[in-house]
Amino acid sequence: MRTSSTFSILFWIYAKRIKNHHAPLYARITVDRKKLNISLKRRIDIRLWNAQKQRVNGAAEKARHINQYLDEVYTKLFQCYQELRAEDRRITPQSIKSKFLGDDVVHYTLRDIIAYHNTKMFHKLHPATARHYLTSQKYILLFLKREYKMEDMELADLDYKFVLNFENFLRKLKPRHYQKQIGNNTTMKHIQRLRRMVTLAYHIEWINNDPFRKFRKKLTPTNRGFLTPEELERVEELHIDSVRLRTVRDLFMFSCYTGISFSDLMALTQENVVMGMDGAYWVITQRQKTGNAVKVPLL
């Protein structure tokens, strides 16, 4: 635990800078005999200043306003001192002044949360998922550059309008490697990844508000077709001269008959073909996406 420290606040006027009977008003912070002055951006009539009470004499409206302001400054400075103690931080006159003026507040940005997410979360993600995040992050920064003419943006500036603008940007985007504009579900995926990063920033208290609280994801239902037995037979019996295309056809057929996805299929090795207890060979592997076991008999 941090040892207790002495702390005091003194209001005083800078008598050497008197002009027309008015002098600048200062607050002096003292911590363990170390002093620091803060200009309060006020000039007061020295004839009304009570140095003993550290307040302005009189009941006039201007005097009441100044005394009320001094009460507020005293309360805020003392609160800054108490918060530093509660946070077990080093207490100095400068640390209190920085907290009082708001200079100790770190203004985190989109690039900050992207870097933090990639450092803290990438090891938990599948490599394919991590690549998707890198793509989404590239689009986020491209959006900032094109729509806001900025290289970065403070997280505190994110709002619901920003989310809607990013959605509209994605819907109009036509990536170089793609033949058309990206679809609705792909757009929602990119927004979902941004949302997860912003939610992470919210949970670690980098921002106070969630700009996605009003946003609703709009996915379009998809119905994937399938081949009939007759169509599958036609593909299987199709004569193909190209060795490469025959390999592609064979991989496709193997996937159809076993139900193993393309990404899992491409990860198979000879070690995945195992003799089972029934005396037959089995393909035993693990889904990359879910980690679930896959056991398929080879007929």
Image (spheres, grey):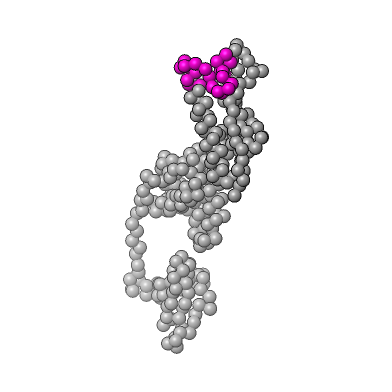
- Which residue corresponds to the image point at 51% horizontal and 45% vertical from the top-left? 206
Q: Is residue 23 magenta?
A: no
On the rendered structure, is 35 left or right of 119? Answer: right
Q: Is residue 44 magenta?
A: yes
Tell me, yes or no, if residue 262 can be seen here.
Answer: no
Q: Nearer the viewer, residue 41 or 168?
A: 41
Q: Nearer the viewer, residue 215 or 230?
A: 215
Q: Is residue 91 above or below residue 46?
A: below
Q: Nearer the viewer, residue 169 or 179?
A: 169
Q: Position of residue 53 (x, y in %)?
A: 55, 23
Residues in magenta? 43-66
Furthest-front residue in this view: 52
- Which residue corresponds to the image point at 52% horizontal and 17% vertical from the top-left? 57
Q: Nearer the viewer, residue 224 or 163?
A: 163
Q: Is residue 4 above or below residue 60?
A: below
- Which residue corresponds to the image point at 50% horizontal and 77% vertical from the top-left? 272
Q: Position of residue 263 (x, y in %)?
A: 48, 67
Q: Is residue 244 above or below residue 58?
A: below
